[in-house]
Amino acid sequence: MAPLALAQFICSFAGSNMNVMINDISEDLDTTVKGVQGTITLFLLIMAVLMIPGSKLTDRWGRKRCFLAGLTLYGIGALVSTFSPNLGMLVLGNSVLEGVGTALLIPPVYILATMAFDDLPSRARAFGLISGMGGVGAAAGPLIGGFIATAISWRAAFLFQAVVIAVIVFLSRRIVDPVPPDPARPFDAAGAVLSAVGMFFVVFGILQAGSDAVLMAAFLTAGAAFLTWFFLHIRARERAGKEALLTMGLFRDRTSNLGLVTQNMQWLILMGTSFVVAVFLQTVRGYNSIETGVIFTAATAGVLLTSLAAERLARKHSQKALISAGFVMTVTGIAVLLVLVGASSRVVAFAPGLLLIGLGVGVMLTPSVNVVQSSFPEELQGEISGLSRSISNLGSSFGTAIAGTILVSGLAEGNRSYALAMVALAVFALVGLAAAARLPAGSG
């Protein structure tokens, strides 16, 4: 479990640690806040669009082989990012190589954990550890990244990632793939392209919201068209008796669908809050990397506390109750952030709200994964794992793209743009709460 949990930690860490280094990177590479935002969003987006194809490749190449290939690509990307002379090379290293590497290594993490434990309590414990480390990685990213960037350089934060990857590769020596790879297994390349292009256009369209409404509408329309084409394609393949990228049956389970919505909203809120608060503190309040990162200790502590208690909470409460309670806490946390930003100029005013958001996300991460993964038999674990991780990472992309665009487009307006971005996140939290409320009463 150690390499699997550590892998989820470093991938989640990578999605948030750059938030506190935006000013440092912008000055060093002679770019803008929007340029760095695009790099972060592209990393999260590439993870999302390739997660489903990555999960299908585990059947052809084997779970351990995909895991190690992903780690290798990720490590190379971290080193390229470390020595990037300009934004283009940073995009190549961080967004592309680390993004593709993550898409290959994350599906095996959940598939191997699912196959290793037959009973629900043991599986819940494994998912609790992995999901908890993911939440801690995302929450601690600004703190660790800020400390490294201030003490050494923003480049050292990527070198730190490369070192962690080397440790994971070393720890992975004893991992045994429970099912042999099947090189003859069909791969739906057309479906992979259609789904990736569709999701890419949707998120890229959202990024245009603050600058070009016409271009935004064009990309969103094109994205919707490609995703519609994708669903028609996989339905046609299934009717023809061919294996599709995704089984349509994955979308017919009501409990799983609602669980996927809650996963998407959780990561949207966590990554959106991380980006908005970090950028606001640096660009409007003038805090440096370490000052910005330290305040995220509250969120890290919140995620860690509730993640460690996941197994004990699962014995006392249903998964539906835990997910609902998590969203209530995150909505409350966002409200506290909105109230205190105008009431006090001190950075500690952000601690109570971030703590509540961390506690809320930590409470619901594990039950959401359990709800989705446990809805399907073992033969569909590869597909649902890929879909689940894709939906979660798409949520991270949406959080950075939507809330980040609202903030960045109105940075000159200070508190007002911050408030609008946080209100948008609160609306998404209420969407997640509504989905949790509709879960069957017996969930968990």
Image: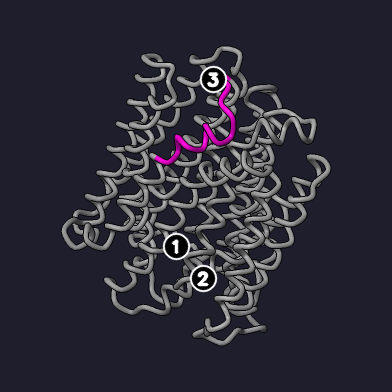
Q: Residue at x 62, y 21 (%)?
A: 409
- Up the image or down, 194 lies above or below 139; here it is below
* Of the pair 347 and 256, the residue shown nearer to us: 347
Q: Which residue is drawn at 58% across and 82% down?
A: 173
- Up the image or down, 276 lies above or below 141; here it is above
Query: Mark 2: which amino acid?
Result: Pro
Q: Which residue is drawn at 53% across and 81% down?
A: 175
* Of the pair 291 and 173, the residue shown nearer to us: 291
Instruction: Give the foreground label among 1 and 3.
Output: 3
Instruction: Identify the image quadrant of the C terminus.
Output: bottom left
The image quarter in which residue 287 lies:
top right
Say which element carries label 1. Answer: helix
The boundaries of the magenta stretch are: 284-297
| Residue 285: mark in rendering | 3
Instruction: Give the foreground label among 1 and 2.
Output: 2
Query: What colour scheme does the image use?
Result: one colour
Q: Mark 1 points at which residue?
A: 250
Q: Distance between the residues labelled 1 and 2?
A: 28 Å
66 left or right of 423 in image: right
| Residue 382: mark in rendering | none
Q: Position of residue 71 (x, y in %)?
A: 64, 67
Whether residue 146 is in magenta: the answer is no
Q: Mark 2 points at which residue?
A: 3
Q: Where is residue 324 in the image (x, y as percent from the top left)?
A: 26, 44
* Of the pair 274 and 286, the residue shown nearer to us: 286
Q: How crowded is mark 2: few (under 14 residues within 10 Å), some or many (20 or more)?
A: many
